[in-house]
Amino acid sequence: MSPSDDAAQAVPARERTATRRGGLGIGILWRFSRPHTIVGTTLSVLALHVIAVTRFRGGALTANLFDLFWTLVVGWCVNIFIVGINQLEDVEIDRINKPFLPIAAGELTQAAGRMIVALAALLSLGIAVTQDAAELIAVTLGLAVGIAYSVPPLRLKRFPVLASLSIMFVRSVVVNLGVWLHFSHSFGGGPTIHPAVWALVAVTIPFSFAIAILKDLPDVEGDRRYAIATFSVRLGARWVFATGVVALTLAELGMATIGPALLHGASRPFLAGAHVAAAAVLWAAAARIDLADRAAITKFYMRVWMLFFLEYVIVAAAYLIG
């Protein structure tokens, strides 16, 4: 029996131990939810709320806090469903690529994972039904894309272009437009899309594309073994890395130059300066990376997520300052 066979046999034993302990710790649930994606969802909802209150309530951040809370809960549940169902379908791959994830590590049983995912889906749909059509449609689309991305027979993650489009669609279109239309309705506004929301859609498209291709850079070994033909597997690390950096640079410089001209009511100097600074941070990190170092690639990928978070903070802050 090979070492990999030993590891495969050991994990179910750890799962049985976790089951006997009977506990689902907060730390395990937090890691199961993939915290960086939760932070991204939270900041996107908060930023869209800030833009809505500057548009409809003159900047009163305490307006509609009850609705904001439940919108965040729905976003978190959809997020947990998407990342959770991916972990349930990718246990063997994660034991190679991401052995720290709770199911792959044997800290959480697959039965418990399925229960969490089912509850997340039911809760998000249950709350959305009580809200408005925009939120219900956004939730339904998010859940559907999550299933199509990870679950056979579609399992779109096998196809790099479709996988990238799936991530871009949810992060750029479903989140931004769905949440904005919900907030606009809750504030008594119409279906008009605020220019800042279109700007966020535009800038998150290249960001989502970069995230979609860069996330697979550290995972080449497991993806190749299980015939997941990501861009990293097919085209190589250097090409994928360069493409991701170019996409991110275009996003930052586009917002630094075009954003101030289109986003009336926002602080133009702040928009331009903050995005130039973000581009500088990106290039400083890119210049130091060693593509042969898996830990360094992962660190850079998380920095991309930090810059993604920052987009929402910058746009919301620009409106508050303006």
Image (cartoon, rainbow, N blue to C red):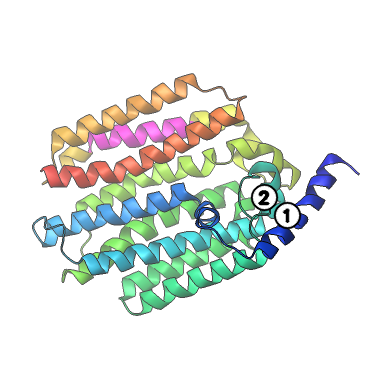
Q: Amino acid at mark 1?
A: Arg
Q: Left or right? Give the position of 187 relative to 23.
A: left
Q: Residue furthest top?
A: 288
Q: Position of residue 26 (x, y in %)?
A: 50, 57
The residue range painted magenta reads: 243-258
Which quarter of the rendered picture does the N terminus lie within?
top right
| Residue at 43% from the left image edge and 34% from the top image edge | 303
Q: Quadrant of residue 218?
A: top right
Residue 263 in sight in this render: no
Question: 114 or 239, which is in the foreground?
Answer: 114
Q: Where is residue 6 shown, x and y percent of the image?
A: 83, 46
Residue occupied by mark 1: 14
Residue depicted at x 48% and y 52%: 167
Disc 1 on helix, strand or loop? helix
Q: Quadrant of the C terminus?
A: top left
Q: Which sits in the foreground, 186 or 116?
A: 116
Q: Which residue is mark 2?
A: 105
CB of mark 2 within 8 Å of CB of mark 1? Answer: yes
Picture mark count: 2
Residue 236 vs 203, above or below: the answer is above
Q: Which secondary structure type mostly characterizes the magenta part of the structure?
A: helix
Q: Which amino acid, by three-letter code, is at mark 2?
A: Ala
The single residue placed furthest to the bottom in the displayed view is 130
Q: Secondary structure at mark 2?
A: loop
Q: Residues within 10 Å of mark 2 (few under 14, many from 20)?
A: some
Q: Is residue 75 magenta?
A: no
Q: Nearer the viewer, residue 137 or 120?
A: 120
Compute the Cα span from label 2 to label 1.
Answer: 8 Å
Left or right position of 309 against 147:
left
For the point 24% across and 32% down, the residue is 274
